Image (cartoon, grey):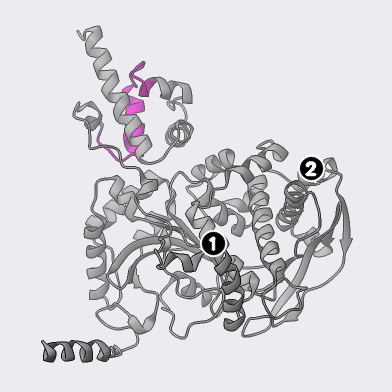
């Protein structure tokens, strides 16, 4: 018969191991409770009971231990082994979202000199203030892992964390803030903007200070977009007191240049202000319609399916943009791409290289990225892909799910949400370099795409279950592919363009070294 001391010791080690696993995967007690409910609602523990288990005050039943073991892909016997693992890995610190570059001499990067030089630089390169602001905002997002708790709290104070919300709920919030709604009738029209071919453009809505929202009649047939625009203007009232200093909400047309009513071809400081306010209001609107805790639980119940918002009146774009902000796993990226290669929005988590940007087209983008493949896909079903990304000597392993859709003006575009798999593999004490090498060799044997080897597939399917992201496992059932930032530097054994361009010899360095050798 077990002694009281033996039971306490058993409870202590079990609780310590469960707590270590939970923290290793960046889950809260509530997250783990929700995951247990998904597996077995009858045997799932409450948050308070889980806390007691972790603190050694309760011993989990065999049934509950099997549930937790399944979630973290461990054998039940592992929990009874009193040998503690290595110190817990913090996934949030394993890969930096962005990397800085120390520039010398540092005095050249003083505030005064930069404020003088940047407008001149942008004017000479034809970069608008709005484009430059997008780069700054992206860097700010990536440094913050796309998490802005102050804006979240402001949205929660208005919405009271209610989820889901319908149009009546949002209109009631607008009335409480003293906002009036007016309707206008304006159909989409053609506009070239900065795109290579004309796009449909639609003015969806705009704010007239101090308290009037103008909405396009077309939104009445698109409740998911109507909710978003209303929430966006509520954000302007809350965050900026409805001063009216912001751009209209527009679909299509100009992809990335200055605000739509701007006339100056050069840098305009107001463009930068408007771009920042657009970001703030957009983030607030998403947080209002998909508050962090209930939406995190909603995504968990649907294994992060990118079309899960269809049932609760959320656009797929909002669902996919919200994933990096609420997921316990911080290593995400997100693209909103218009053909043939313009990024309307991008969150470049973990510093993922881009095949092209939102300011200028490149002549040789790698065509094997999921977003490029989806441009030619006529269907609207989501598709998953596992990719080995090679950029020089840097090798990474990504998975993503992409879907082709249409904006409010009717333009076709591709949405893509993905995660960096390397931190998740490290959290399982798996060397990601070995997994990447296995997959890359298979891809090279197949000319650039190939089946994922069994050992690597088993590892990734385990990660899929741990992270509860169903499309990781879906991607494992399809051939993986090698991608890179530029086709001209294709890293495949069989170059995707048919031949490799010879590298120019570094003649200047050769001349220097030759002269130094002669003089020595």
Q: Position of residue 121 (x, y in %)?
A: 57, 78
Q: Is residue 229 above or below residue 403?
A: above
Q: Is residue 200 magenta?
A: no
Question: Element under label 1?
Answer: helix
Q: Residue at x 66, y 49 (%)?
A: 284
Report the front residue among 276 and 444: 276
Query: Taking the image as drawn, is residue 477 in sight?
Result: no
Eye-nearest disc, 2 or 1 = 1
Q: Is residue 328 above or below residue 223?
A: above
Report the front residue among 109 and 359: 109
Q: Position of residue 17 (x, y in %)?
A: 29, 30
Q: Using the rendered view, name the quadrant where residue 130 is placed.
A: bottom right
Image mark for residue 138 = 1
Where are the magenta residues, as a range?
53-75
Dot 2 or dot 1: first in sequence order is 1
Give the residue pinned by disc 2.
173
Question: Element under label 2?
Answer: helix
Image mark for residue 35 = none
Is residue 365 rendered to the left or right of residue 180?
Answer: left
Specify few, some or many for label 1: CA neighbours under 10 Å numbering under 14, 14-19, or 20 or more.
Answer: some
As measured in the structure, the alpha-carbon distance from the residue carrying label 2 to the one carrying label 1 is 30 Å
Q: Residue at x 55, y 68 (%)?
A: 114
Q: Using the rendered view, name the quadrant where residue 444 is placed.
A: bottom left
Is residue 251 rendered to the left or right of residue 399?
Answer: right
Q: How many marks?
A: 2
Mark 2 and mark 1 residues within 8 Å of each other at the beta carbon: no
Report the front residue among 50 and 85: 85
Name the image quarter holding the C terminus: bottom left
Q: Position of residue 27 (x, y in %)?
A: 43, 38
Is residue 10 rendered to the left or right of residue 514?
Answer: right
Q: Residue at x 59, y 83 (%)?
A: 124
Name the image quarter holding the N terminus: top left
């Amino acid at each position: 018969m077990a002694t009281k001391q033996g039971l306490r010791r058993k409870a202590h080690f079990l609780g310590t191991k469960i707590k270590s696993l939970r923290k290793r995967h960046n889950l809260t007690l509530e997250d783990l409770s929700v995951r247990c409910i998904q597996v077995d609602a009858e045997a799932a523990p409450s948050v308070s009971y889980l806390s007691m288990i972790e603190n050694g005050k309760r011993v989990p039943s065999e049934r509950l231990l099997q549930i937790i073991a399944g979630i973290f892909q461990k054998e039940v016997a592992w929990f009874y082994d009193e040998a503690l693992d290595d110190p817990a890995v913090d996934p949030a610190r394993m890969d930096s979202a962005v990397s800085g570059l120390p520039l010398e001499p540092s005095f050249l990067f003083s505030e005064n000199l930069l404020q003088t030089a940047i407008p001149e630089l942008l004017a000479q390169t034809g970069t608008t203030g709005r484009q430059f602001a997008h780069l700054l905002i992206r860097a700010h997002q990536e440094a913050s892992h796309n998490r802005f708790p102050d804006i979240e709290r402001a949205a929660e104070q208005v919405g009271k964390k209610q989820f889901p919300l319908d149009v009546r709920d949002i209109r009631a919030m607008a009335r409480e803030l003293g906002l009036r709604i007016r309707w206008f009738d304006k159909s989409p029209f053609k506009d070239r903007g900065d795109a290579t071919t004309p796009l449909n453009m639609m003015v969806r809505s705009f704010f007239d200070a101090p308290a009037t929202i103008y909405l396009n009649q077309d939104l009445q047939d698109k409740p998911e977009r109507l909710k978003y625009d209303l929430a966006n203007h509520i954000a302007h009232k809350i965050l900026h007191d409805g001063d009216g200093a912001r751009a209209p909400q527009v679909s299509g047309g100009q992809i990335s240049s200055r605000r739509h009513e701007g006339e100056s071809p050069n840098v305009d400081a107001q463009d930068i202000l408007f771009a920042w306010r657009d970001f703030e209001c957009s983030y607030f609107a998403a947080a209002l319609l998909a508050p962090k805790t209930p939406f995190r639980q909603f995504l968990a119940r649907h294994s992060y399916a990118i079309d899960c918002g269809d049932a609760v009146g959320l656009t797929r774009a909002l669902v996919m943009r919200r994933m990096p902000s609420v997921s316990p796993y911080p290593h995400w990226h997100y693209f909103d791409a218009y053909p043939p290669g313009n990024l309307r929005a991008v969150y470049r988590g973990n510093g993922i290289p881009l095949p092209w940007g939102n300011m200028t087209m490149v002549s040789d983008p790698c065509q094997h990225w999921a977003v490029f493949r989806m441009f030619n896909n006529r269907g609207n079903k989501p598709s998953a892909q596992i990719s080995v990304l090679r950029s020089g000597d840097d090798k990474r392993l990504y998975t993503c799910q992409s879907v082709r859709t249409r904006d409010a003006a009717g333009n076709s575009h591709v949405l893509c949400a993905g995660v960096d798999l390397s931190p998740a593999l490290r959290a399982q004490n798996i060397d990601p370099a070995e997994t990447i090498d296995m997959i890359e060799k298979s891809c090279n044997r197949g000319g650039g795409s190939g089946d994922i080897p069994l050992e690597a597939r088993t590892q990734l399917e385990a990660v899929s279950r741990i992270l509860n992201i169903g499309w990781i496992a879906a991607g494992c059932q399809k051939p993986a592919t090698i991608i890179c930032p530029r086709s001209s530097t294709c890293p495949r054994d069989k170059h995707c363009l048919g031949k490799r361009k010879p590298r120019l010899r570094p003649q200047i360095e050769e001349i220097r070294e030759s002269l130094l050798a002669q003089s020595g």
